[in-house]
Amino acid sequence: QVQLVESGGGLVQVGGSLRLSCAASGDTANIYVVGWFRQAPGKERDVVARITWRNGETYYTNSVKGRFTISRDNAKKTAYLQMNSLKPEDTAVYYCASRVITSSEFDSWGQGTQVTVSS
């Protein structure tokens, strides 16, 4: 089992930046992909970005391309989401999640961190 703890959320003005961190512990040797998701009030939780742990291959949802960057530090067992040029519509609870190579679903989730972008 993998445990994930997010940090770095907060209140920021439009156009500002935040960096979220996701620290992994437990059975981290089997992590295949780490993803960042977000859920705004009244909306479903959607994927924002994901990264393949071993080779660093990335994916971004269209609305954050060019503004957000996902990365990972294998030695620190930590994934990051650098968020620049933030917009009010980026306001949400952000979650990190991981899945192992034998699973088709993200099966470990963090507790979430609130990001609020004020206009």
Image: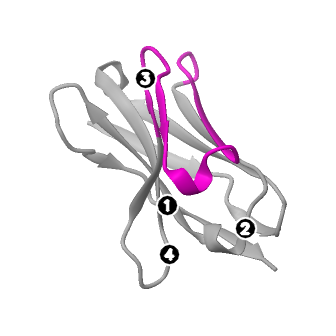
Residue 79 placement (x, y as % from top left): 55, 34
Disc 3 to disc 1, C-alpha distance: 20 Å
Q: Where are the magenta residues, as a range?
A: 50-76
- The foreground one among 103 and 5 is 103
Front of the two marks 4 and 1: 4
Label 1 vs label 2, nearer the camera: 2
Label of residue 74 in the image: none
Q: Which residue is mark 4?
A: 40
For mark 1, give the secondary structure: loop
Residue projecting furthest to the front: 62
Pick whichever of labels 3 and 4 is earlier in the sequence: 4
Of callouts 1 and 2, the N-terminal one:
2
Residue located beneath label 3 in the image: 53
Q: Identify the mark at residue 112; answer none if there is no mark.
A: 1
Q: Residue 17: x percent and y percent?
A: 80, 54
| Residue displayed at 69% across by 72% down | 116
Q: Which corner quadrant of the image does residue 10 belong to?
A: bottom right
Q: Is residue 66 magenta?
A: yes
Q: Label 4 to label 1, Cα distance in Å?
A: 12 Å
Amino acid type, residue under disc 4 in the picture: Ala
Q: Which residue is mark 2?
A: 87
* Residue type of the residue flagged with mark 3: Trp
- Please say whether residue 116 is one of the residues in the magenta stretch: no
